[in-house]
Image (tube, helix red, strand yellow):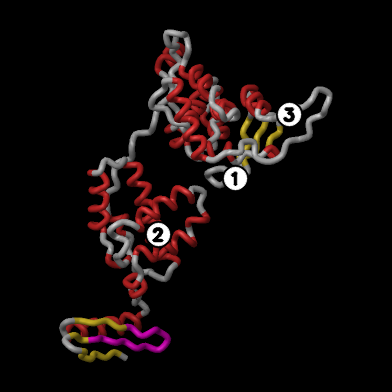
Amino acid sequence: MASVTQRGNRWRAQVYKKGHKPLFKSFLYKADADKWATETERAIQRGEFVDMSAARETTLLKALERYQNEITPQKKGKAQETLRIEAWKKGPLASRSLASIRGSDIAEWRDKRLADKKSPTTIRNDLAVLSHLFTVAAKEWGMEGLSNPVQRIKLPAAGRARDRRLDPKPNKEGKTEQDRLLAACEGRPVKWFALLVRLALATAMRQGEMLALQWENIDLESKVARLVDSKNGEARDVPLSTAAIAALQATLPPVPEGVMRLPPRGAVFDANTDKIVNEFRAACKAAGITGLRFHDLRHEATSRLFEIGLNPMEAASVTGHKTLQMLKRYTHLRAEDLAKRLG
């Protein structure tokens, strides 16, 4: 049953239907209230009514808090996503209801971020969090009629894939970038850091994969390291070269002569991401190397897999890339090297 009553200078429409929660909405004009009440009642009878009250009553801030508690902990990149969520919480849209946020609002936010010289990749990643929140709200939080405003705008063009590799050309002292980098890493107070860098260059493992590496999952005899939980959520066996095995063995403390070493257990590297970033930055500065990030070592190692003759499927099985397109983004072959092979 639908009814319209006047309250002060506004008209309140009410719809009561058996098996459905009561619905209310206020209007300035009685004709609008009558129309809404009639259309809503008919939509309920046809089974077509979509209740937007939850989306109107839920602010973006409240939704972000729920998403952070329920969805983010299930993700691999929860630490980075938490930082993005905290930024959204402090933004101008946080106090707005989900139902009120339009594509134009997101476009305005995007344009301001671009004007502030934020990278397209950063903006796309921030928007990916918001887009997933709206998708989850519509599919799982009972807000079926909620549209996703992020899907209504044009995303900034994806940034160019990084192609930074270690320069193989020696300097005046006859040292390549790798020589200088490793020497600087060896000179750091953290003795295992140089070994971590050597392992990255020898295996193309991600930083997080190396930090999660456990001795129980390494078979030095078979030359295989088992990554139980990689970034893409699947286990992966990484073949270990002689250089990789040497780096791993060097992390173990020495044992007296004639004493048998017990099988090591636990994490290979007792470190965190911040520590690695700081150590790598300091090492690059000491080596006089600019424009190099730790993740570029994965690009370097991946490219070297092709340079030693591995085909794309073989390389992908080592690096863990799920698509050849992503593998291509991490592969940067030098034209001068290809010219030599061409003869």
Magenta segment: does it hold 52? no
Label 2 to label 3: alpha-carbon separation = 47 Å
Q: Quadrant of the N terminus?
A: bottom left
Q: Residue at x 23, y 82 (%)?
A: 26
First of labels 2, 1 by sequence position: 2
Quadrant where the C terminus is found in the figure: top left
**Viewer-nearest residue: 187 or 318:** 187
Which residue is denoted by mark 1 in the rendering?
Answer: 229
What is the chief secondary structure element of the magenta stretch? strand
Return the residue nearer the eye: 145 or 245: 245
Amino acid under label 1?
A: Asp
Image height of 11 relative to 154, above or below: below
Query: Which residue extends farthest front?
Result: 189
Provide the secondary structure element on which disc 2 rests. Answer: helix
Inspect the magenta stretch and tell me whether residue 19 lies in it.
yes
Crowdedness near tag 1: few (<14), some (14–19) or many (≥20) residues, C-alpha within 10 Å: some
Q: Which residues are magenta?
A: 12-23
Residue drawn where x is 84% and y is 24% of the image: 258
| 108 on left or right of 181 | left
